[in-house]
Image (spheres, grey):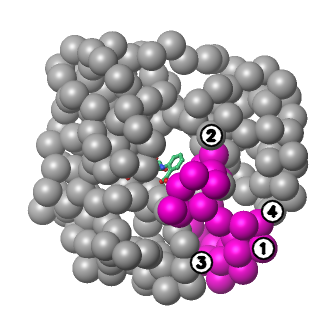
Amino acid sequence: MMRTSMNRTKIKICGIKTQQDIVIMNRTKPDYAGFVFFEKSKRHLTYDQAADLLANLDHGITPVAVCVSPDSARIEAIARLGFPIIQIHGNLTNEMIEQWPNQIWQAVNVEGEDLPEIMSHPKIVGYVVDGAKYGSGQSFAWSKELAKACVSLPHLILAGGLNAENVCEGIQLFQPDIVDVSSGVELPEMGKDAAKVEAFIRAVREGA
Ligand SMILES: O=C(O)c1ccccc1N[C@@H]1O[C@H](COP(=O)(O)O)[C@@H](O)[C@H]1O
């Protein structure tokens, strides 16, 4: 059985780090932009940096705060920045769900052949199915079996190692609601590569 989505596949560009990235977002207009709050990541932002970036983000692009097993101070600070969605990797607990006032995307990092267990709660409105190591640019092992398992997810965000070359195959196999990319549209040093962002968006929107 396949997922059936009547709507076009939406796009999230993750790991926004610089004002130049914001210029690229505002010009190319993905549906979502991801901001990482995780000290071990090269894409980590301080709250002040995030506030400066958010102030310039086009209102038509929904910002998503990305974090790993956040403590309550982290959740409070991200909520204060006004993010409508938090994407949580690692542990997701009932306490976090209670504290966070808005929508949640639960990230599941696939290590083997099976889909990890997911939580169910009215605030959890999406599931990010990602490679084993977040933000590594590596896919999980795509298979028809995993695509079938994903059919049960109410809102699927496909992530992990996507780029302009493989995203159409991912869309065909998983029929995701949203595709999510970071490494695949990045410059070697820091920030997003405008040409790669454009090619990714064109591939998704035009099937090119
Ligand atoms: O990008 C990061 O450094 C990161 C850190 C902590 C949690 C998630 C992170 N990134 C997420 O990883 C996926 C896929 O990224 P990639 O395209 O494989 O590089 C995406 O959801 C990012 O939000």
Which element is circle 1 on?
Answer: helix
Q: Which residues are magenta?
A: 38-67
The residue that label 2 is drawn on is 68
Of callouts 4 and 1, which one flags the residue occurring earlier in the amino acid sequence? 1
Residues 43 and 80: in front is 43
Amino acid type, label 1? Asp
Residue 45 part of the magenta-drawn span: yes
The residue that label 1 is drawn on is 48
> Quadrant location of residue 130?
top left
The residue that label 3 is drawn on is 58
The residue that label 4 is drawn on is 81
Q: Is residue 153 left or right of residue 149?
A: right
Q: Nearer the viewer, mark 3 or mark 2?
A: 2
Of callouts 4 and 2, which one flags the residue occurring earlier in the amino acid sequence? 2
Amino acid type, label 3? Asp
Residue 136 % position (x, y): 37, 48
The residue under the point 84% across, 55% down is 77
Q: Is residue 199 left or right of residue 15?
A: left
Looking at the image, is 87 positioned above or below residue 173?
below
Residue 60 part of the magenta-drawn span: yes
The residue under the point 61% across, 17% down is 119
Residue 12 % position (x, y): 45, 56
Q: Nearer the viewer, mark 4 or mark 2?
A: 2
Q: CA distance from mark 4 to mark 2?
A: 17 Å
Q: CA distance from mark 4 to mark 3?
A: 16 Å
Which element is circle 2 on?
Answer: strand
Q: Quadrant of the N terminus?
A: top left
The residue under the point 34% across, 59% down is 183
Of callouts 4 and 3, which one flags the residue occurring earlier in the amino acid sequence? 3
Q: Nearer the viewer, mark 4 or mark 3?
A: 4
Amino acid type, label 4? Leu
